[in-house]
């Protein structure tokens, strides 16, 4: 009994002292910011047609639905065209703030307000990806998602005591206990919410005749709205692919929470489901939905994997050393004089020397 | 190291937060879960917790995906004259709009696909129950087919959106002399999986003509 109380207490103190998933939440912030930005940019040229005061979703219908659902939209405050334009551009700015981490939690919260407002302005355009985005953003705003992977930390990593891209700042000291606690609790909600999406969307398919008889994929890909003409027919006319794909998707989605819970199957399952979402993007053209889901998959993947992936990408693409091996001591000849980002591989002394040299 | 009082504050806060999170997830599970006895009893409470800001629905392509091609055509006329235009397909162009720029395609096609979903099944639950009852040859009360005021406004919102979309296309196609348009809903049951090698063949087609409506001018200006 006392042992149990002790371990419960240990859990409590870890919730208050150990922020988890700082990289995951940062990735989610960048992803949901980017998906929001894509939404604004995709409709930029015809924004007045889709969302304007005289848009395709009429002003009266818009106002009526808002009062029916007891909801708000900043676009409802004025019917003037300039107000609409101002808000649309503010929405783009808020999405950029969310991506870059400018404004911290407030930036994320403002992005949610702007995105919610535009979603309400024309709810007929929305899909499951937007639904998940607006549900997760308020919780994301409670997390410390701007601790790493921001414009700020990007610059800081060149400083001697800074962090590597994809490496959280030394955490507990930087984040107070209350902020740590709120962060951890919000992260639990985010992960649980994503798992519910998988579980429910998977289980519902088991109730469908076309899913059970293994043909659902044919009907989905054959629908003109989701058909990529030369390519999709090659997929949906292939019987075995359709059957395997149909059953594969059902099982993968429904069992994903369990596969994620188990450390040894986590990464494999998540890369498989990311592959599923990538093919939804390419074949069906549902880029917004697919990217939202892929970002959520990254959250489930967790910090350890993300940091390792980040390091690998850095070493492959940027030719920089993996942070895991970086000790701050590099042999002098390794520092490439002409490399634009040489500071990242330098020891503190070298960095200081270069800074001094550059000083006027 | 923290003192006793702080430790108790942390314990209390953790318990309260855990209770809140449990409530949230319980509400989500009831809200997004299938219709069952718990949902019949507590569904409204769950909705009060979640709607509007955490409203969610995860029956994605489920229980069954739509197994037909749905679209709209439009034709126009000048009031007072007997001259009526031919039907114009405004669905294919919306679909290709939505595939035009890879990552940055506008969601034009949703105006039609989501509009038609709202119009054809304003309440999927009821549609499902009626479909089941019909399949089992049960006697259905006439009132089961009557729409609630919410469902009716859902439908009329959808129609208004489609009229506004179709109007812009009609005005571009036939000029501003058109003052009324009519929408024809087309549901095409394309060849089933067993005939997938002839997937491009025309299957059975059902149509429904909506009443003539005033053309909407100035949409998107």
Image (tube, coloured by chain):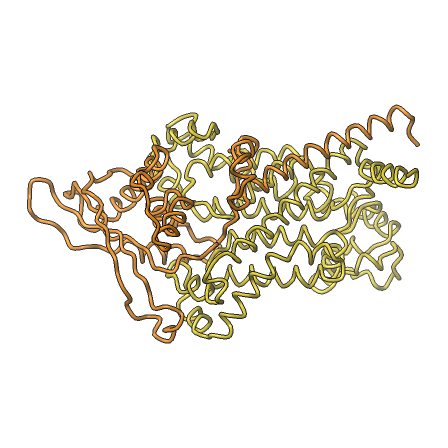
Chain colours: A yellow, B orange
Taking A138 as reference, is A319 above or below it? below
Q: Residue at the location (72% across, 32% down)?
A: B17
Query: In this orientation, does residue B220 appear?
Result: no
Name the side, left or right, on which A208 lies relative to A312.
Answer: left
What is the tally of numbered marks visible in this picture? 0
- The picture places residue A271, in percent across and down from the top left corner, at 65, 62
Query: In this orientation, does residue A162 appear?
Result: yes
Name the side, left or right, on which B87 lies relative to A69.
Answer: left
Name the side, left or right, on which A86 lies relative to A224.
Answer: right
Q: Hey, which residue is sitting farthest top in the picture? A: B5
Quadrant housing the N terminus of chain A: top right
Q: Hey, which residue is sitting farthest left in the picture? A: B81
Between A252 and A315, the one nearer to me in the picture: A252
- The picture places residue A185, in percent across and down from the top left corner, at 72, 38
- Quarter of the image holding residue B219? top left
Name the side, left or right, on which A303 lies relative to A57.
Answer: right
- The picture places residue B113, in percent across and down from the top left corner, at 37, 51
Between A134 and A351, the one nearer to me in the picture: A134
Q: Residue at the location (51% across, 37% down)?
A: B40
- The picture places residue A65, in percent across and down from the top left corner, at 40, 32
Q: Residue at the location (44% across, 66% down)?
A: A218
Taking B220 as reference, is A75 above or below it? above
Between A332 and B155, the one nearer to me in the picture: B155
Q: Residue at the location (76% across, 58% down)?
A: A263
Quadrant housing the C terminus of chain A: top right
């Amino acid at each position: 009994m006392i042992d149990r109380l002790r371990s419960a207490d240990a859990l409590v103190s870890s919730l208050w002292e150990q922020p988890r998933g700082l990289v995951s939440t940062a990735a989610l912030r960048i992803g949901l910011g980017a998906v929001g930005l894509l939404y604004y940019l995709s409709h930029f040229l015809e924004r007045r047609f889709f969302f304007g005061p005289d848009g395709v979703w009429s002003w009266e219908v818009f106002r009526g639905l808002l009062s029916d659902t007891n909801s708000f939209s900043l676009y409802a405050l004025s019917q003037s065209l300039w107000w609409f334009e101002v808000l649309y551009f503010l929405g783009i700015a808020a999405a950029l703030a969310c991506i870059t981490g400018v404004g911290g939690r407030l930036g994320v919260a403002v992005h949610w307000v702007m995105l919610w407002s535009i979603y309400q302005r024309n709810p007929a355009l929305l899909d499951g990806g937007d639904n998940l985005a607006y549900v997760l953003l308020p919780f994301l705003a409670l997390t410390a998602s701007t601790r790493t992977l921001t414009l700020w930390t990007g610059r800081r990593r060149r400083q001697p005591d800074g962090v590597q891209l994809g490496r959280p700042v030394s955490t507990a000291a930087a984040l107070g206990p209350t902020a740590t606690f709120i962060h951890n609790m919000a992260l639990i909600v985010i992960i649980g919410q994503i798992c519910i999406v998988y579980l429910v969307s998977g289980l519902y398919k088991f109730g469908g005749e076309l899913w059970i008889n293994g043909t659902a994929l044919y009907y989905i890909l054959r629908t003109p709205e989701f058909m990529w003409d030369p390519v999709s027919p090659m997929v949906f006319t292939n019987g075995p692919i359709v059957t395997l794909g149909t059953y594969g998707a059902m099982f993968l989605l429904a069992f994903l929470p369990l596969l994620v819970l188990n450390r040894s199957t986590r990464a494999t399952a998540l890369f498989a489901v990311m592959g599923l979402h990538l093919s939804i993007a390419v074949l069906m053209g549902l880029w917004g939905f697919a990217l939202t889901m892929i970002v959520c998959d990254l959250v489930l993947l967790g910090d350890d994997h993300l940091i390792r992936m980040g390091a690998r990408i850095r070493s492959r693409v940027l030719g920089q050393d993996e942070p895991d091996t970086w000790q701050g001591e590099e042999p002098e000849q390794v520092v490439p004089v002409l490399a634009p980002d040489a500071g990242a591989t330098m020891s503190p002394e070298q960095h200081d020397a270069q800074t001094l040299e550059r000083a006027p | 190291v923290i003192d006793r009082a702080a430790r108790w504050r942390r314990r209390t806060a953790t318990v309260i937060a855990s209770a809140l999170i449990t409530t949230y997830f319980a509400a989500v599970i009831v809200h997004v879960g299938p219709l069952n006895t718990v949902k019949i009893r507590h569904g409204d409470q769950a909705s009060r917790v979640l709607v509007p800001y955490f409203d969610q629905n995860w029956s994605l392509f489920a229980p069954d995906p739509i197994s037909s091609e749905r679209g709209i055509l439009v034709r126009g006329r000048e009031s007072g004259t007997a001259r009526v235009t031919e039907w114009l397909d405004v669905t294919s162009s919306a679909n290709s709009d939505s595939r035009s720029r890879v990552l940055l395609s506008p969601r034009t096609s949703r105006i039609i696909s989501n509009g038609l979903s709202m119009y054809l099944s304003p309440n999927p639950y009821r549609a499902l129950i009626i479909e089941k009852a019909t399949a089992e040859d049960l006697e259905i009360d006439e009132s089961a087919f009557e729409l609630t005021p919410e469902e009716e406004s859902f439908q009329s919102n959808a129609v208004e959106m489609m009229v506004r979309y179709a109007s812009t296309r009609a005005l571009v196609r036939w000029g501003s002399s058109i003052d009324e348009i009519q929408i024809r809903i087309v549901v095409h049951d394309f060849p089933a999986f067993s005939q997938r090698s002839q997937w491009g063949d025309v299957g059975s087609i059902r149509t429904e003509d909506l009443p003539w409506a005033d053309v909407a001018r100035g949409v998107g200006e």
